[in-house]
Image: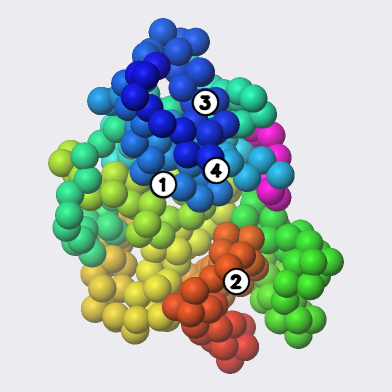
Amino acid sequence: MNAHITFMPSTDLPIRAATETALAHGIKPDRCDILQDGNTLVIRLTETLVARVVQDVDGPRQGTAWFARENAIAQHLSQQEAPVIPLHPDLPPGPHEHQGYPLNFWLFVTALDAEPEASAVGRTLRRCHEVLQTFSEPLPKLAILTESLDLLETLEKRELFPESTLQLLRDRLVTSMEILSTFPHQPLHGDAHLGNLMNTTTGLLWTDWEDTFSGPVEWDVASVIWNAQILDEDHDTVKQILDAYRQAGGHVDSTALHHSLIARAAVMSAWYPILYPNPNEKRRMKLQHRLDWLATVNG
């Protein structure tokens, strides 16, 4: 390990877990560039090697089963040349665990400072869905929805939401899950918002497959258009994404999309106190917008 690397107090152990795992597989880190510091720490260790380390080891997700699903999905997509960031080829896919921290390793890609074209978003998502149809390993059904429903009990115990809000989220999740369970299911990204899509020198690449599950494709479509449709009312962008997805061979059912939009809002609201325990004013306003929309939308 490079002698010039300095560990920050809050990230010391996760960084050590990543660097020591890399060293154990014959890779000597020569840098420590922190790309993201949240529940998951993302660090660049060499010219090509990026590590993702779960820092919130006491959070709602325990163990490495969900990382294992992510790795399997990422490998399958990469082998079929889908538009995704691949796992790093010089380490076993894992998932790895060291000093109690789950982690995996990815190939570094160079991001462009340019917004992706809306039509390209729809095309690349459809391409991933097409490849995912041949993924044969079993995945949990509607996992992030069922997980969010269970999470409401924790929110109630910790008094993070008033009872009226908890009941609103519970009702919306239960109803949408019942309806979405009647539509065809296949492997999905699970959290297909634009923050998990990188515009790179090799094109648009999807990343962060840790929420992968089995469900209707409309869930991913709803995830990628939610902000544009509900928060920004940017209907032109929504239309371009949907048109491109359909032109690439995808089918979007309006009922499944509607209930996916509702469920997506409920899921994001349920996770807000976990992801953002001290939200700024902008985040508080976004949460309130979601809750207000959920209270008024026809379900």
Q: Which residue is mark 4?
A: 10
Q: Is residue 63 left or right of residue 18?
A: right
In the image, taking residue 17 as reference, residue 154 lies left or right, namely right
Q: Give the class, few, some or many, for how many residues have Cα within 10 Å of label 3's Cα (few <14, many ≥20).
A: some
Q: CA distance from mark 2 to mark 1?
A: 22 Å
Residue at the image point whose x is 17% and y is 49% from the top: 112
What kind of secondary structure does the magenta stretch mostly adopt?
loop
Is residue 170 visible to the viewer in this orientation of the structure? no
Looking at the image, is mark 3 or mark 2 nearer the viewer? Answer: 3
Residue 43 higher or lower than 281, as above or below: above
C-alpha separation, residue under disc 1 versus residue under disc 3: 16 Å
Reading the image, the residue beneath label 3 is 16
Q: Are marks 2 and 1 in contact (CB under 8 Å)?
A: no
Q: Earlier in the sequence, mark 4 or mark 3?
A: 4
Residue at label 1?
A: 36
Q: Position of residue 80 (x, y in %)?
A: 33, 30
What numbered label is drawn on residue 17?
A: none
Q: In the image, is 215 to the left or to the right of 253?
A: right
User: Residue at label 2?
Assistant: 269
Distance (Cα) linking label 4 and label 2: 27 Å
Q: Name the N-terminal-most of marks 2 and 1.
A: 1
Amino acid type of disc 1?
Answer: Gln
Q: Is the residue under label 2 in contact with that under label 3 (CB below 8 Å)?
A: no
Q: Quadrant of the N terminus?
A: top left
Check whether the beta carbons of the residues at disc 4 and disc 3 lie within 8 A of each other: no
Amino acid carrying label 4: it is Ser
Q: Nearer the viewer, mark 1 or mark 3?
A: 3
Q: Which residues are magenta?
A: 59-65
